[in-house]
Structure formats: structure tokens, C-alpha cells
Amino acid sequence: MTAAAARRRALALLLLLTLLWGTSWPIFPIVLREVSPWNFRAVSLPVAGLLLLALARLQGQSLAVPRRHWRTMVLAVLCYLVVWNIATTYAVLLIPSGQTAVLGYTMPLWVALISVSLFGERLTPRLMLALALGGAGVLMLVARSVGAYAQAPLGFGLGLLAGLGWAVGTLILKRDPIDVPATVLTGWQLLLTSVPLLAGAWWFASGPVVLPSATTVALIVYITLLPMSIGNAAWFAIVRLLPANVAGLSSIMVPVVAMVSGAVVLGEPLGALQVGAMACCAAALALTLLRPA
């Protein structure tokens, strides 16, 4: 596949990813009103993983992952999916969902920092400008919530931890690629992630299990089928198509959609700073993925 074709495919996947992940953020607090964070993840993760593996099997793909790749896959799972799912699930209980998304999506900034400081990679001027714009967008989105972070510093820390874990997991996969279809890789990673989360759900269980309302069940089904399964499969496909820095920056529009969705669904703030942040993120994305003829 040529570089231009890879960018076009990545752009199409990114559009799908942005819509699925961005609109899912305001749903989390609604679900967590009736379901504990551990039970929610303990249900959605294994079901999404099994669905993806079943889909891969129906498409005639082998579900086997070569033994030499298991160490890499487990390390990536621990750094990204386990840290991400636990940290973001608790963060949305402490700070607004849109702000949790913003903090989690500092991931491209962590990727750039780690790549330059530890691996000696050099950033092109174009990518440096894109990072600067993306960072400015994140700062603008964070600016109005400094007071909320002061009241809930744990939520702020968990949001940043989620972004750092995602960055480390992405770099692990980029530096030691796993040569299996994205659907198979995602399915196994979701299943591996569900193991510690199932243990946590059992450990922290208290009181009788209460069946949630039909609306909450429908939202859990939606998150499991679309953002969790298809969204993660799209992300791992993007990671294969693009360099780590570019892949990270390509996700920067997700918190913008999360902010708009949070404003519509939950009444979270949306003003001039948020609009300016959207413009910065859009410019960063254009610099990252669009190339002059």
C-alpha cells in the first residue's frame, strides 16, 4: 500500500473512530449511575473481545497469535487498555466526561515526549507545529476546569495517567509490530484486559446485584458493540498505517466531539475557549494527515 493510500484509509478510519469514541464519552456517566465501574467494564470488555474474534473467524481469519508476540501484546494491554479503562472509568465520576476525554487525549503529547527523550526520534517542523496546535487546543479545553481539578485532583491525575498509559502501549506496538489482522489483535487484547477487570469486579463487589434499567442496558450494548469493539479495531488499524506520532495526533479530534456531545447530552460547558480549541485541533489534524500535492 502506498503512503497516499495509507493516509486515505487512515482518514476514513479516523472519521469512524472520532464519531464512535467522541459520542461515547457522555454516555459513561449515565451508565455509571446504575452500574459500578468494575461491573460495567467486566461485562463490556469480554463481550466485545469475543464478538471481534467471532467476526474474524467468520471472515476466515486465523485466531492464532504467534508465541513470539504474546509478550508484546500483554505489555501493550497492561499499559494501554488496563490503565485506560480503570483510570477513565473512575475519572468520569470525579470530573466532567468531556474534560476526562481531553486529559486522556494528551496521549500524542506523551508519545512525542517519550519518542524524543528515550528513543532519540526527530520531529519534522510540520509535526512540531501540529503538536503545538494540538497542545494549545488541549490547554484551552482544560483552562475553564482548573477549579474543578483543584477540587478533584484525583480525577485530574487519573485522566493524565490514562493518556500516558495509552501512549506507552501505542509505542510498544509500533516498535514491535504484531503481524495478525487488526480484528484478531483487538479481540485478544480486549479479552486479556477483561481478566484483571473481572477480578476487580469480584473483589470490589458489595451487596446484591441489581438489574439496571432498559435504557442503561441499551447504552451498555451500544458501547460494547460500537465504541469498544469497532472503535478499538479501527484504532489498532490506524496505528499500523501511520507512525506513532501521527497516529497519536490523528485522535486529537475525539475530545472535541466529546465536548460537543457532553454539552448536548449532559449540559456541560461549551463556549469560546472550546470553539478555539476545536479550531486548533482541526488544524493539527490537517497538518498531520493532509499533504500538499
Image (cartoon, rainbow, N blue to C red):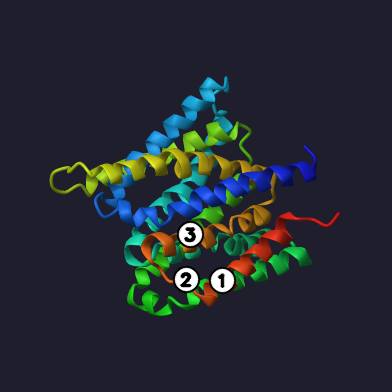
The quarter of the picture where residue 215 lies is top left
For the residue labelled by badge 2, is the local secondary structure a helix, a strand or a loop? loop
Are there few (<14), some (14-19), or many (20+) residues within 10 Å of tag 1? some
Residue at the image position 61 percent from the left and 41 percent from the top: 237
Q: Position of residue 55 (x, y in %)?
A: 50, 26
The quarter of the picture where residue 289 lies is bottom right
Instruction: Report the Cα–Cα distance between label 2 and label 3.
Output: 11 Å
Q: Which of the two discs, 1 and 3, labels the residue nearer the N terminus?
A: 3
Q: Which mark is residue 262?
A: none
Quadrant location, the N terminus? top right
Q: Residue furthest left?
A: 207
Pick the residue in front: 162 or 59: 59
Instruction: Say which amino acid is labelled 1.
Output: Val
Q: Are marks 2 and 3 in contact (CB under 8 Å)?
A: no
Residue 288 vs residue 203: left or right?
right
Instruction: Say which amino acid is labelled 3.
Output: Ala
Residue at which label 1 appears: 275
For the residue labelled by badge 1, is the local secondary structure a helix, a strand or a loop? helix
Are there few (<14), some (14-19), or many (20+) residues within 10 Å of tag 2? some
Q: Position of residue 100 (x, y in %)?
A: 43, 63
Q: Which of the two discs, 2 and 3, labels the residue nearer the N terminus?
A: 3
Residue at the image position 59 percent from the left and 67 percent from the top: 278
Residue 199 vs residue 137: left or right?
left
Instruction: Say which amino acid is labelled 2.
Output: Leu
Q: Are marks 1 and 3 in contact (CB under 8 Å)?
A: no
Q: Position of residue 287 (x, y in %)?
A: 73, 61
Instruction: Report the Cα–Cα distance between label 1 and label 3.
Output: 13 Å
Residue at which label 3 appears: 258
